[in-house]
Amino acid sequence: MTTHPALKQLTINTEDAARAIHNLAMESSRAAIRRRRGVLVTLDSCVSPPLEDAKVDVSPSYDDLKTAIEPAPEYGKEIESLHQILYTSCFCVQKGASGAPVARLRLQGGLRSSSKGVTFGILFSSHPHHDIPEESPYQGGPQWQDTHISVPKLRAVKFGPEDQHDTTGSEEDLLSSEDFCAYISEPLDSDGDYAILLFSANLNRGKLVFEDSDTSSPRELGFKRPSISLGQLLKVTPAVDLKGKKKEVLSWLLAKAVWQYYSSPWMLEPWSKERVHFIFERRRTDRGEQHAGFFPDEPLLSISITPSAGKNDNEARKKSSKSTDAGSSGRKRPKIDRSSHRIPKILSLGVMLVEIQLGRPIESLYREPRWQMHCNADGTPSRNINHKICKDLIKVDRILRDVADPLEALIDSCIQPRKAFLPPVAEDEKGVRSALYTLVHALEVYPPTHHPVAAALHPRTLKWLTKHPAVCSTQSTSTQAWLRRMDTVKFILRGAADDSFANAKIAVLDTGVSPDDAASEYLSGYHDLVNRGSGPMDKTGHGTSSANLVMDMCPSAEVYAIRVFEHDSANDKTLSLALEAITWCVDNEIDIVCMAFGFTDHNNELYTAIHAASLKMLIFAASTNDGNASKIHYPAQYDDSVICMFSTNGAVKGSWFNHSIGLPGTDNFAILGQDIETSSSNSAAAAKSVEPEQKYGTSFSTAIAAGVAGLLLEFSRHRDTRAYFENPLVPGLRGKWGMAKVLRRISVKDSSFHCIQPWGLLPDSLQQVPPPEGFIIQPEQVQAARKVARRTMIEGLVFRG
């Protein structure tokens, strides 16, 4: 405060302060806007930043997904060193001990690098050399000790005093196996407090050195619970709800881990779902909510540490190397491999990823009649049954149709390796690992920091934007250009990962949503007013398309599907169901209602309900697809309450099926609704027709407009913009007239229609042409573009025109 004497003076005389703030807020000139901005910056500099360690995100959040897709570092030598040190230093030699030490190696969040070395996270199960007293906190099940083991960086991995010089720890600091068992089996103090034990590796002596213990931030793990394997987790999928982002996060983490450890002694045998484990954990959100369970962003590798295992691993590696050399040189005739897949480790990864998509173990399919053809004559599973089932699931059932492109390519290549993992692409194990790297690091289609604009999409959008149930890719060049420009708008206007703002709540009143479509996994709520209490359903695909379009235009919105139509045409109950849905929207404080339908006749009850709801939310409704052959439908005709939507093509020209004059005296807004590519929501129909169907209609325009409005509404709530939109002199965007003013600002006239082009919010350099493939927008350009968008919207709201 000493550096801001004017602020200090205002704190002395509060009346003067109140008067000054009031005058500054009420003034509407551009100079006042600049002054307000300066005041906000000054005030912000006086506020202490929040404590970073006070915030714990629930998994899997968008941040978890970004972490999962970040490039995996290359730690080959350090990974081998870790294996060597564990199997030479951390096994137990005491006869009376309870078996070999059991450990869980963290595959995510356990790798940290510095200039000196790489730190690995490992959980060790309690391994006492004596009976545990009944009063001990270690009674009642496995006791996990969280440890960090630091391995120095080396140019080559060799063990022995003549090969390496390592000054880590003196002779007396080196731990014996008995010492190590004591560390992982005893509490640090009489209270039994948990801590993270910090060890370093002395590669010269093949021993560990205890460095310290960290009690400041131990994880809230289920220390007294056994870990659970991925196989067990898949058996109870309904209870753990393994779907959506959880599948994506887990799939990418496992794929990255397989690449990292592929040529190491950790993976002499293929990893199966029984090797991948999870441990019970508690996490707290920044809102104070506590979540407990097994989180998919923390997979662990199950290992049992015995000296014979380490020795066998080395022998197996030498044997494998010799057989590979002999086979490649032709000196020895290779054995006949009767398996249908030539790379077991890649096949095992593919099977795990397919199981994650299915949400169940593949063995659960063996007894189904369809798959018994892959069994032996006696009914036992054949050697290649997993491979054959996975091929059928991908090719016939098309289980990857809703999966993002990079993940689909990875899974498909693992199951059908010819194009990615076999000669001439990959000649040996090194080539296989390199090919896996290429597939795993195709993740950059997701938007972390610097990324192509064309791929700057919310993670869930990738599930349907270009895939089979897609509604936004199209063969029309002009429509493709429209959508690519829209991708740029979404990239610029999206909220920061650490920003806390109210997501737009958008209700889609329609025919429901198909349970087979990716959109059903991301709904914030589903309400079937036709068949009370039933799950997602859509007999026509119309509502599914609408929901997809809304989600694509505003990826972070909370979308609610309300089923009021059983078929495309209304029946005698539809109107009353629509009225009930509107009441639900008001009661649940929905921001935007998408009514991609219409009734031919005026109804007093409908008008009253619509008018009352419009005072609290935005309502978009479809006009008509019959040109001048019919009048504009209701509620779109209620212009005082509803934004009536017409259609444009990709060139931002009015569509041929629009009513030629629209509603006289109104804005007649139009947005893309032509050459939209969709496919049937009915799974049987979809299986017969691989090619998507091109459709058109003001229904699509209505859904797209509702999504765009949600994007603008969320932008106004972001940390760097909300102060401008909360000014009492600025009309609200949740009202029809406020949103209409902004839409008018970013529209071009074509005959009677205001044709909306959302990229009108951006600087000229970003709106003239669609961005080329691979085009990069730098962070400073993003900030500049956001300021232009904010100014354009504020000017549209404040000024007439």
Image: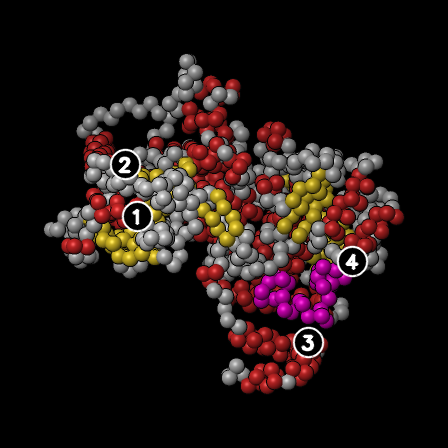
Q: Who comes first in sequence, dot 1 or dot 2?
A: 2
- Please state which amino acid type lies under the numbered disc 1: Glu
Magenta residues span 715-743
The answer to whether mark 1 and mark 3 are in CB contact below 8 A is no
- Please state which amino acid type lies under the numbered disc 3: Ala
The local secondary structure at tag 2 comes to loop
* Residue 475: % across, % down: 60, 43
* Residue 134: % across, % down: 35, 41
Q: Who comes first in sequence, dot 1 or dot 4?
A: 1
- Please state which amino acid type lies under the numbered disc 4: Leu
Of circles 3 and 2, which is in front?
A: 2
Q: Nearer the viewer, residue 419 or 520?
A: 520
The residue where tag 2 is placed is 98
Q: Who comes first in sequence, dot 4 or dot 2?
A: 2
The residue where tag 3 is placed is 25
Identify the residue at image location x=61%, y=42%. Answer: 519
* Residue 564: % across, % down: 75, 40
The local secondary structure at tag 3 comes to helix
* Residue 799: % across, % down: 73, 71
> Local crowd at mark 2 within 10 Å, few (<14), some, or many (≥20)?
some
Q: Who comes first in sequence, dot 3 or dot 2?
A: 3
The answer to whether mark 4 and mark 2 are in CB contact below 8 A is no
Marks 1 and 4, how far apart at CA: 65 Å
Q: Which mark is residue 186?
A: 1
Q: Is residue 423 magenta?
A: no
Identify the residue at image location x=85%, y=51%. Answer: 608
> Local crowd at mark 3 within 10 Å, few (<14), some, or many (≥20)?
some
